[in-house]
Amino acid sequence: MPNSRFSSASRAQLEELENLGSPVDLSVAGVTPRSQDLQIEQTGSVDFASNILELQGGGVGYVAEISITNLLTRPVKLIRVELRAPWIDRPVHWLTAIPIRNRASAHRSSTSLVYRFPENDMTFDYDEVLNHRLLEEGILPGKCSFQGLLLAAGGPLPAELRHGEWRDLCLTVVAADHTEYSTTLQLWTTRLPEELQKPPSYSPERIFKPGELQRNDSTIAPQSADQAIASSAKPDTSAQENDPETKVAPGE
């Protein structure tokens, strides 16, 4: 309960002192500390839903399942989302949704929005990803919570990150008033099998830009996060199956 000895002007002065970096105890005036305005938590199965993924071509994919809650009664405007770690020497590239043309037949097709890592077939349904909500819309309504995936790409994957290791990363959300809200994410490192590794070709320019239309002549069913991550580690045997030299004649 707010202390009746403090007027609204006094509470405002305390908030101003905090904004200037002075150590003050806002609780005595019934003021919620700024760091508690937004609450960010890692959710889901830590060792599966949240991953550092080695991508074909030398890039790195970051998948983090989080919830973000605005505890205020007013909306909060976001201006930036950052992912920080000792090996990340430049800002990661947050994925944007891309339109996919789903062709069910020669005469019928439809378009849907999905998220996809560059040089990778991992596809995430639009509605399970938070990128567009936090980075494009950038508004968190008051007393509202959202849960979903954050998807980013960077690279290359440092040699010291070994398959199966847990790594801590710092996720920071910056509001329009430049207040930073941070939490520590714990991600599981997933390296590709040697047979799927290709010479490094990662570059920021290869990230899909908004509006790019990716054509697919078969109906695409966007995968869940669990399905997408699991399928990324499966060897691609399509080329081997189509190679006449690898086929075995009946009876051999």
Image (tube, grey):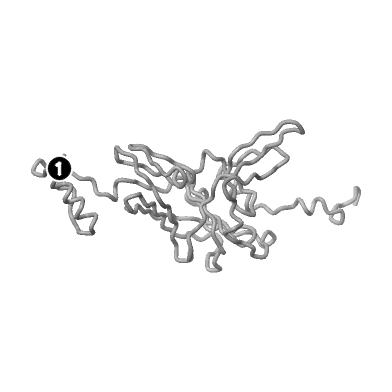
Query: In the image, residue 4 lies at what x, y percent?
Result: 10, 40
Query: In the image, residue 174 lies at what x, y percent?
Result: 37, 52
- Circle 1 packing at 10 Å, graded few (<14), some (14-19), many (20+), is few
Using the image, determine if residue 126 lies above or below residue 58.
Answer: above
The residue drawn where x is 33% and y is 37% is 143
Q: In the drawing, does residue 128 fall left or right of residue 28?
A: right
Residue ranking furthest to the bottom: 160
> Quarter of the image containing the N terminus?
top left
Q: Nearer the viewer, residue 214 or 196?
A: 214
The answer to whether residue 99 is seen in the rendering is: yes
Q: Nearer the viewer, residue 104 or 13?
A: 13
Residue ranking furthest to the front: 211
The answer to whether residue 51 is seen in the rendering is: no
Q: Nearer the viewer, residue 62 or 205?
A: 205
Using the image, determine if residue 158 lies above or below residue 44.
Answer: below
User: Where, by quadrant of the figure, is residue 69 drawn?
Assistant: top left
For mark 1, what is the residue?
A: 8
The residue drawn where x is 77% and y is 33% is 106
Query: In the image, residue 18 lies at what x, y percent?
Result: 22, 54
Q: At label 1, which amino acid type do we have?
A: Ser
Figure label count: 1
| Label 1: which secondary element | helix
Residue ranking furthest to the left: 5
User: Where, by quadrant of the figure, is residue 67 drawn?
Assistant: top left
